[in-house]
Amino acid sequence: MKRVGIIGGGQLAWMMGDAAKKLGVELIIQTPHKDDPAVSIAQETVFAAVDDAVATGILAQKCDIITFENEFVDLDALSLLENQGVCFRPRLAALAPLLDKYHQRCYLQNLGLPVPKFFALEQPEDRSKIEYLGFPVVLKARRHGYDGQGTYVIQDLATLLKIVNQSQTAFLVEEFIPFTKELAIIAARSVNGEILTYPVVETQQEQQVCRRVIAPAEITAEQEAEIRAIAHTLLNSLQAVGIFGIELFLTGNGKILVNEIAPRTHNSGHFSLDACEVSQFEQHLRAVCGLPLVNPILHCSGAVMVNLLGYQNSHSDYQNQRQQLGEIPHSHLHWYGKSESRIGRKLGHITVLLEQPNQDAVNTLIQTIESIWYTHS
Ligand code: ADP
C-alpha cells in the first residue's frame, strides 16, 4: 500500500479517486477548503493553501510520495523538504523551469523545440521589440496564469501599457499565432524513464478557456509523430515522472508550435477516463508509485469531451440538465460536486464515445450538449 500526497484538491485530484482505489493507493490531500472536490475521496486532508510549505511538511509525514494537481507552489520552501529526503514526483527540478511562462519559453527554445517569438517585458523601451512583433501581440502574466487569466490578446500599444501599468505583475509578450487548430498531448514518464503518449487531441478554447476536446485530432501522421517526439524530448530533458500535458498550435502552413506545458494531469486528457485503456489519472498514479505504465490507446474510434462551465452565480446542482445530458447515448458525465457555480468555473465534463468520428457527427453532438447545458433556467 502506497500513500500518495497530492498538493491541490480540485477536480484533477478528485478524478484520481477511482484509480487510487483500483491500485490500492491511499490519497492524502493538501487543499484549503473543506468543500474542495477531492476532500470527499481523500483518506485524510491537510487543510492549507497549496503554497503553504509548512503544511506540505505535515503532508510529507503522512505519505510516501508527494505529487501535484496544482503547480502554484513555493518551490524554494519545498526544496528544503526535498533536501531532507521528501520524495516529490515529479521532482522539483522538473517543475522549476515551467512555473514562470517566460522561463518555460526559454527552456523550450533552448531544447530546440518550436515556440512563438517572445520576450520578457521589462521597460517601455521594449516598444521597439513590440513593434517588431507587430500587433496583435499576446501579453501574458509570467506567473499564476490559468484558464486564460492573465492572458490578453492586445491590438495596440495604449491598451498594452494600460494593462501593464495597472498591474504589479511581470509580463511576457509574444507573437499572436493565427492558428488553424489548437492541439494537445498527454504524456507519461515512469521512474525507469519509459515514456508513453496518449493520442494527440484537438482542443477548442473560447475566451482562452478550454470548452471542448476532440480525440483523436484530425492531423497528418507526420504531425502526430512530430508532437509525440516533442513530448519525448521534453519529458526526457526534465527527467519528469508522472503525467505532463502539452498544448500546441497548428498553423495554416502545417507548422507546430508549443504553447504551454502543464506538469500534471490536464483538462485535455479527461477523455481518457472513458475512451482509453488507462486514464491519465491512473497512469499518473502508476508513474509516481513506480508501477508499470499501461499503453494508453483509445478503446473506441474517437471521443468528444465538453466542459460544463458555470454560466451564472448559483448554488444549483443542475439536476435537470445533468439528467438530460446523461441520456445522450454513449455518454459519461463527470460532475465535480462543487457547492457553488461561478461564471466560467469548471463544474463537470461530459465525454461521448464515437463509433465513427466525422466532423458533422462531432459538431451535432457538441451542439446538443451545449444547448442542454447552457439553458439559462
Ligand atoms: P493559460 O495558462 O491561462 O491557459 P495560455 O497561454 O494557454 O494560458 O493561453 C490560453 C489561450 O489563449 C490559448 O489556448 C489560446 O487560445 C490563446 N493564446 C495563448 N497564446 C497565444 C498566442 N501566442 N497566439 C494566439 N493565441 C494564443
Image (spheres, rainbow, N blue to C red):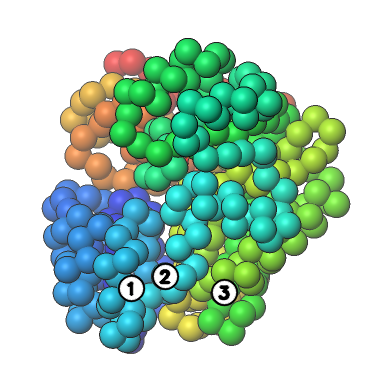
Q: Is residue 11 above or below residue 94?
A: above
Query: For residue 250, what is the image quadrant?
Result: top right
Give the residue drawn at x 20%, y 74%. Answer: 57
Q: Position of residue 195 (x, y in %)?
A: 64, 72
Q: Secondary structure at mark 1?
A: helix
Q: Which mark is residue 91?
A: none
Give the residue drawn at x 47%, y 20%. Answer: 160
The kind of residue tagged 1 is Ser
Q: In this orientation, which residue lies closer to the viewer: 116 or 41?
A: 116
Total labels: the figure holds 3
- For the N terminus, the image quarter is bottom left
Give the residue drawn at x 61%, y 80%. Answer: 193
Report if the CB atoms under discs 2 and 1 are less than 8 Å apart.
yes
Callout 2: few (<14), some (14-19), or many (20+) C-alpha neighbours within 10 Å? some
Q: In this orientation, which residue lies closer to the viewer: 290 or 70?
A: 70
Q: Which mark is residue 239?
A: 3
Indicate left or right for 266 with 8 as reference: right
Give the residue drawn at x 67%, y 53%. Answer: 109
Report if the CB atoms under discs 3 and 2 are less than 8 Å apart.
no
